[in-house]
């Protein structure tokens, strides 16, 4: 099949694009390569894709185009020219804390960008749009685990609000135009090739350098850390489950072309235990600076993945200690290569 993967130089997007191409699909990857974090890491991910495909003789299965999803005309032209069969939309302005200081970046990427993708899918008869939502839509909900049927009307960050808006926009297009859409609520993704703005990278770097790490809410936080390979496996399986098709279980009777799934490890980890996993993998003790809760943060995330398992016969299960061993090993190797 022919796929569009947006955010193809990103953490999740690069891995999804790589795996689809290795399966023999034809993948066009787009990314604007912005400087929210070091573009050199994004280039390195693209080089990784090229190297892996070269090893298997599948270079022709992946093309990269530098393009901003907020560019309406360029996106319309891309869809019209390429005639994608399926779209996996993973490009977004990420980060909860960054959204407090730079709100307009989220409007451009997460709202305008989602609309250009929806319009491209609508006008070019795309078979299935899979897009990234986030566990942040649950806000500070007390009921755990978080289920797809829970109300998500109280986001506490602009980032979360844009992701909830994406789900509403998709719902509308599925209803009006029978466009099959599936939203995936990712829960704290980590692993090799991860993002420098996220806790695994920031904590690991500081601990290895002997620097103090800031521990918010005095360590009284829990996160459902989910390993990158589990996330990618979930994405690849769900893109084959097209809402509204004859063999597919309908989630909403009044909108059968719309679906939402959690993808999480279904096992929340206390922040102190997460830090301990890094210490174990790095062989270094952390120096901690305990701080109050930060604006926009939530106290806990915990995914109910029963619907994902029902639809795909799969659920994430990589243990944090094993995943952090992989991440820290990769991190040391990447830092050494970057240095030299």
Image (cartoon, helix red, strand yellow):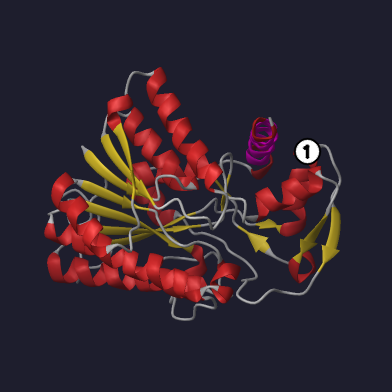
Image quadrant containing the C terminus: top right
Residue 140 makes an appearance in the image: no
Q: At 52% across and 55% down in the image, what residue appears? A: 35
Q: Position of residue 219 (x, y in %)?
A: 77, 64
Membership of 179 in magenta stretch: no
Q: Position of residue 276 (x, y in %)?
A: 78, 48
Nearer-the-camera pick, 263 or 54 = 54
Q: Is 247 on the left-hand or right-hand side of 149? A: left
Nearer-the-camera pick, 336 or 210 = 336
Residue 167 makes an appearance in the image: yes
Q: Is 44 on the left-hand or right-hand side of 283? A: left
Q: At 39% across and 35% down in the image, what residue appears? A: 18
Quadrant assignment, res 27: top left
Nearer-the-camera pick, 54 or 172 = 54
Q: At 38% across and 34% down in the image, what residue appears? A: 19
Nearer-the-camera pick, 177 or 82 = 82
Number of numbered labels in the structure image:
1
Quick check: 216 above or below 130? below
Q: At 17% across and 45% down in the image, what residue appears? A: 82
The span picked out in magenta is 323-336
């Amino acid at each position: 099949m022919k796929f569009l993967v947006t955010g193809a130089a990103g953490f999740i997007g690069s891995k999804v694009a790589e795996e689809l191409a290795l399966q023999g699909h034809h993948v066009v990857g787009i990314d604007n390569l912005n400087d929210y974090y070091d573009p050199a890491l994004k280039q390195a991910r693209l080089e990784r894709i090229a190297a892996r495909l070269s090893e298997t003789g599948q270079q022709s299965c992946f093309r990269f185009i530098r393009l901003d999803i907020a560019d309406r005309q360029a996106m319309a032209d891309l869809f019209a020219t390429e005639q994608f069969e399926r779209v996996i939309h993973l490009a977004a302005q990420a980060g909860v804390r960054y959204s407090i200081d730079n709100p307009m970046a989220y409007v451009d990427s997460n709202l305008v960008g989602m609309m250009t993708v929806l319009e491209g899918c609508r006008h070019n008869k795309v078979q299935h749009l899979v897009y990234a939502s986030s566990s942040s839509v649950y806000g500070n909900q007390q009921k755990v685990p978080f289920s797809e049927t829970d109300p998500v009307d109280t986001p506490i960050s602009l980032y979360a609000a844009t992701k909830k808006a994406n789900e509403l926009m998709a719902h509308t297009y599925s209803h009006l135009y029978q466009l099959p859409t599936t939203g995936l609520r990712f829960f704290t993704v980590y692993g090799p090739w991860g993002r420098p703005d996220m806790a695994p990278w920031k904590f690991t770097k500081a601990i290895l350098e002997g620097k103090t790490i800031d521990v918010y809410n005095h360590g009284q936080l829990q996160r459902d850390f989910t390993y990158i390979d589990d996330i990618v496996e979930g994405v690849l399986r769900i893109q084959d489950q097209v809402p509204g098709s004859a063999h597919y279980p309908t989630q909403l009777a009044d909108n059968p072309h719309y679906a939402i799934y959690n993808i999480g490890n279904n096992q929340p980890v206390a922040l102190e235990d997460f830090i301990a996993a890094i210490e174990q993998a790095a062989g270094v003790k952390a120096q901690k600076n305990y701080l109050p809760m930060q604006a926009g943060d939530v106290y806990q995330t915990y995914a109910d993945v029963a619907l994902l398992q029902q639809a795909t016969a799969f659920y994430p299960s990589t243990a944090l200690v094993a995943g952090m061993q992989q991440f820290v090993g990769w991190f040391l190797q990447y830092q050494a290569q970057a240095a030299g």
